[in-house]
Amino acid sequence: MSVQSAAADVDVDLRQLFASLARNWLRILVFVLVVTGVAFGFASLATRHYKAQTQVEIVPRESVYTRPAGNTDGDKPILDEQGVATQVQIISSNEILKQVAQKLGLSRLPEFDETINMSSLSRVLILLGLKNDPMDVPADERVLKKMREKLNVYGVEKTRIIAIEFSSEDPKLAAAIPDAIAAAYIAGQGAAKRESNTAAADFLAPEIADLSKQVKDAEAKVAAYRAQSDLLIGGNNSVLATQQLAELSTELSRVRANRAAAEGTADSVRKALQNGGSLDSLPEVLSSDLIQRLRERQVELRANIADMSTTLLDNHPRIRAAKSQLADLDAQIRSEAQKVMKGLVMQADAAKARENQLVADVNTLKAASAQAGEQQVGLDALQRDAAAKRQQLELYLTNYREAASRQDRNYVPVDARIVSPASVPAEPYFPKIGPIVGAAAAASLLLAAVFTLLRELFSGRAMRPATGARFVPIDEVPMPPPVHQEPSSRLEPPVARELANRPAEAPLPERVMAEMIAQPQPAVEAESAAHAAPVAGAAPVAEAKPMAEAEPVTEIQRPRSVLGEIDIEKAAEKLIASGAARAIFVSPEGDEAAASAILVAREVSDAGLRVLLLDLTASGAASRPMLDSGLFPGITDLLASQAQFSDVIHADLYSDCHVIPVGTADPVRAMRAADRLPIIMQSLTTAYDLVVVECGPADAQGISRLGSDATEVFLSMLEPDDEVTRAAVKLIENGYPDLTLVTPLGHEPPGTPGRRSAA
């Protein structure tokens, strides 16, 4: 089968792809039933396995009444996460499993020893060397291997509970083995504690005897050293020399203070007597009783003198006698003050003598205390040794009494207990017929569906040409019979012919619109360059069509000249060869001349390019023959913001060309947004290889906003009359010197499918 492909793009037809599931429903159903039946048979014939679980809690069992004094470990968690994991390994150790296997006689059961009742097939495989001989492994190892395969010991998350699970073909055995493992674990922990307790008691007994003798010897050494060194202990539990030195130091400080006070008082009295000052301010003088009486007599005489002075003169004998007595009193007071001063001086001398004696005694005690301090160092060392041994002896005695009492009473609590013993399971955990059959049915249904979809996809039946690509198997397309028609015939085909040749469906070009709206410009240019290659290959297809030799295009220079025009094929060839991105058609003769744009667009599309026709006529003359209706949304709806690109682009009923009709929106409202037309043209040029614009009887100013660098301008002509000539001259004079005239004469009307196949 030969394939003609211009764009080499294909899309997956999802409707066709998933329709294959409905076509092959019987095959899928049979496959699902077979797989489900096999799964049901396997589940029904498989050996039943039962599972039971025992839970062991790791918790301190020591009572508050039997806990050793001063032990506060019971207030703290006994095990952390690592400790629980360690106990899990202990429970699944070989020692415990061997004890359980021996206790329950598991080595005699075929479930745990495959050498018992070995099948003939296994024996043959062993003889052929395809299977290891289990007899080479010791019986205990075979049993342990099977037990480990069926055993699962794990710590429950965020707890100190250890779960012991075991599966077996016998439900009673499945419940008995985890209970036996838990009991063996607790018994092993108790035996370990008893062994540790016994070992501690055996160790402490001789140690206590040795420590008792050592403590006695150490205390004897302390007493002998104290007696030898004359380190007598005073009242404050200190050496006697040190205590005496402290007392003498205190007495010396007191004597020095008294001497200093006496010397200071004597100096103050001496200065008062020498300077003739008043003695009333000295407390030591005032404290003398004699001085106090003399002072009273002195005050009395002064009072008498003052009384007599009021009546007698100063030279009166009585006044002179009183003054003489007052002078004698002053002399007596000073004499007594000197005596007080002498007494203070003597007191200071006595204090100084006492101080000197105390200093001598302190110096003597200092030497004795220094010697006692040196001897005290040795004594302290002996005392520390004796105290340490005594403390260790007391600790050993306490521990020994604890261990001996637990050993005699056989009280060794284990920090574990069984909180949930295993119960005999009533239902097997494997096989579960319902889940197995359901899973098999779902898996088989999914596999069958995937296999069917893949087969449909790889066969190519679920593939269809991508939007904008031509992918038509030539030998499978039924070619319609040739239609003989006059070249000048412009009659519309019958309705029945149109319906017979109308395509089954014309999907909306979703991918084209995504590229047109979202693809960046550099990528679009690369895509346009990529599509230029098929165009070169498609040129021979256009040249192979039967057509007359092309005449040179005659440039229009003046009105009413004889104009040369080209036909539809030549116009299409010119667009393909020049690589034009836009083709603007002007039809000054009205709607009938708009057929040129339709025919050229279809011709270029047949060559393999992606072509879109934009109808800018007022009556929709270019889009109506392509869609057989004028009620589709189009360019006016897009300008009026009432529709999007995906809503206004439609597929031609008779070719691979796409078309944007006039639309159904208000033209006045649409023309308000005419400034958006260049942006729309740029987007369409980016998405399509060629954009054909039918402008109707437009002038040069009207088509100015539609052009670009790669734009070809055509003037569609039916008859070379004056109206066409004037229109051509105006276009040339207004900046379009490369104007090309094209005529639709000699071709079928645009609404007729003719030899085209459904798009």
Image: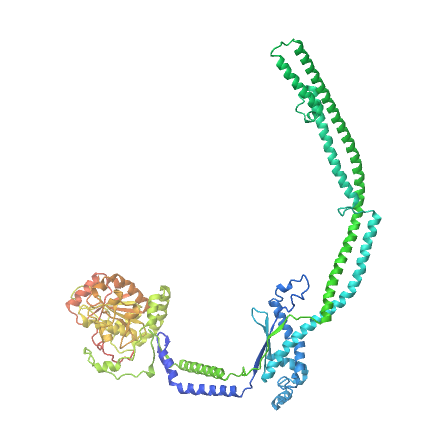
Of residue 249 and residue 310, the one placed in the foreground of this image is 310
Q: Where is residue 368 in the image (x, y as percent from the top left)?
A: 81, 42
Q: Where is residue 478 in the image (x, y as percent from the top left)?
A: 30, 84
Name of the residue lying farthest toward the bottom: 120
Q: Position of residue 372 (x, y in %)?
A: 80, 45
The answer to whether residue 506 is left or right of residue 696 is right
Q: Where is residue 17 in the image (x, y as percent from the top left)?
A: 38, 80
The answer to whether residue 466 is left or right of residue 588 is right
Q: How many numbered dots are placed on residues in this image?
A: 0
Quadrant housing residue 612:
bottom left
The answer to whether residue 179 is left or right of residue 644 is right
Q: Quadrant of the N terminus?
A: bottom left
- Residue 366 to residue 17: above or below: above
Quadrant housing residue 717:
bottom left
Of residue 735 and residue 46, the one placed in the foreground of this image is 46
Q: Is residue 550 visible?
A: no
Of residue 29 and residue 520, the one placed in the foreground of this image is 29
Q: Is residue 39 visible?
A: yes
Q: Quadrant of the C terminus?
A: bottom left
Looking at the picture, the colour scheme in use is rainbow
Quadrant housing residue 697:
bottom left
